[in-house]
Image (cartoon, helix red, strand yellow):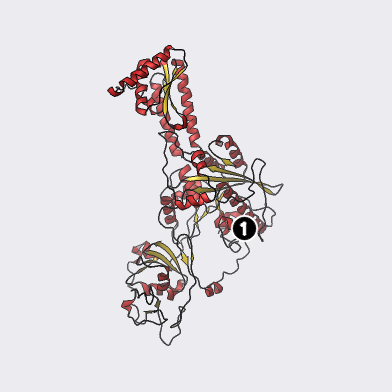
Amino acid sequence: MEITRHNFKQVIDQVSEAVDEASFLCIDGEFTGLNNGPVLHGFDTPQERYDKLRKGSLDFLFVQFGLCAFKYETEESRFVARPFNFYIFPRPLNRNAPDCRFLCQASSLHFLASQGMDFNKVFRDGIPYLSPVDEQQMRDTLDQKHATQQLNSPPFTSGTSQTSDSSRSIQVPAEHKDFIQQTVTRIQSFIDSEEESLQLEPCNAYLRKLIYSTVKNKFSSSVYLETKVGEQNQHYFIEVSKANEEVLKKRGEEKRQQELDELDDAVGMSKIIKMICQSGKLVIGHNMLLDVLHLVHKFSYPLPQEIDEFKSLVNCLFPRLLDTKLMASMHPFKELVSNTTLGDLEATLGKEPFKVPVIVFPEDFPGYETAQEHQAGYDAYITGRCFTIMANYLGKFKSQSKPALPGSALLEPFVNKLYLMRVQDIPYVNLTGQDLKPNRDHVFHVTFPKEWKSNDLYQLFRPFGPIYIAWIDDVSAFVALNKKDQSDLAYKMLCEGVSYRVRRYGDHKDPNTSHGRKRPLSLPETFAPWNGEGKRLKVTSSDVGRRVSPVTQRCITTILEEAEDKPTTEAGGEGEEHPEEDGDEDENGDEMKEEKSEEKTNEAPQAPLFEEPEAW
């Protein structure tokens, strides 16, 4: 069901009913951009990733919100889905209301447009919203305005900010005296006539202010003035009507109620988010960390600086969250699912050994006959569909015919954990506990010339096995060794480079940790780079770290020999070339190089049968 500001009032009760009856709720959001801050890399800590998203993502606009309420009917053994697709735009209520400034990312807008996003509908028909803080400020402003009016005589005016100044007499400048005198003459003629109302000529805000002040002083409570907006909001004019004290009092009360109703309309989309929060239902999303950040910041409260405070805030607003991308990445699904993007996940879950439960739509909710990817309502529905299939699969571990529904202990390992995109060793943010703190002794912070590319780093660390590169910027990156037992040797050999600098991850994050550490040993003379023909160059340890001529290679390749007559290390024998696979590069430029032989010998053992865990 598509919802804009034009039908929002008519369907809000229907949304409330769907939320109340739901077994769980699925959500999705579409934005005008994703990130305007520092690069997100594979070795962000949860606090660092939170900081980057908080500073770099929240200035983008939330343009579409998808909500799909799923209700499980036990007797029919089926799910009933009610999807809603909300168009959102923070239209300001008046000049005192927040006037949102926001960012756009060209690639994101192009992508949404290619998927059929109607931006005219967003900007023209989008549902407005106010956060609780903004709403309270607006209510305080209205209360102050009405209190000021009550202190004076019954209000004879209705308009914008001019009413608060109407009790003060303003001296009319000489250049405007003729205009004001003509206006007063017209109003006097109107009072003497039998006409019910008089529309004055459109004029600017300053002239309207002069009219309000002059008319109040001259006619007191004989007339009622109201500022109105012309066609297509192109100009403002004043409408004059006859009145007495009783009429003015009634008009003032009506105007106050009208302003309160307009404020209530301006709260708009925040009502839906509040409805979801108050339901206490399990809220499900796919890769939903960014969605949650936007929902909290735009419709609830500003995000705190510390991630622990953020967790507490989220726990108050959304006590139970579940991320299907994380769920699909964990046992028992990770052995069965190769790609966890939403579309690929749905395709995988539609095949054996999974079984798709029955999902139906009510008569007044048209189903999705064709895919509408990246429409928020459809993506929310697909997220719920994926969850029902995985919940159905979990149900068999308890020898039950129905899926693992909210409240089942089988779902607890996945609850209140939000997937961390592309972080290598911390898969999620734990909303109800401490985040994982993996050992990163095998990770190095490397700085180098701007001209260096990935291959330069591959060659630099080549003797120590496959590596993973997480780019920070043009001159620095984190490099992780696949063979973690080589980390001490790698640091010893590479820490004194001339054109580059290698530091341990812990030393980079906290330089104080290296105090008191012994200076690394000097490199042996047999430590030599390769030339382009597979032969070692005759160099000394002082040459290590310098760039080799492009004729040979763009970067340094280091080889350490135990002795000429001893077996070679895993890095390879003398003169042996090591072919490398092309790395898989993701959107952030993170790359992983893996050898085929490593993939074969290091295959993960088959996971044990999934049992109901006490803790993950």
Q: Could you say which is closer to the camera, residue 170 or residue 337? A: 170
One can see residue 4 in this view: yes
Above or below, 225 relative to 368: above
Picture coordinates of residue 383 (x, y %)? 58, 52
Residue that protrudes farthest toward the top in the picture:
192
Q: Is residue 64 left or right of residue 174?
A: right
Residue that protrudes farthest toward the left in the picture:
174
Q: List the residue tagged with mark 1.
A: 347
Locate the C terminus and report the quarter of the image it occupies: bottom right
Q: Is residue 429 left or right of residue 492?
A: right
Q: Is residue 604 left or right of residue 361?
A: left
Picture coordinates of residue 292 (x, y %)? 50, 49
Residue 233, quarter of the rendered image: top left
Residue 537, quarter of the rendered image: bottom left
Picture coordinates of residue 505 (x, y %)? 40, 65
Residue type (three-letter) at the residue carrying disc 1? Ala
Residue drawn at x 45%, y 56% is 46
Residue that protrudes farthest toward the right in the picture:
75
Check disc 1: other Cα within 10 Å, few if <14, some if 14-19, many if 20+: few
Above or below, 60 relative to 173: below
Residue 43, quarter of the rendered image: bottom left
Q: Is residue 222 left or right of residue 607?
A: left
Q: Could you say which is closer to the camera, residue 580 or residue 52? A: 580
Above or below, 91 relative to 539: above
State the count of labels: 1
Locate the N terminus and report the quarter of the image it occupies: top right
Picture coordinates of residue 360 (x, y %)? 67, 47
Q: Could you say which is closer to the camera, residue 65 or residue 402? A: 65
Residue drawn at x 43%, y 38% is 134
One can see residue 88 in this view: no
Residue drawn at x 45%, y 78% is 571
Secondary structure under tag 1 reads helix
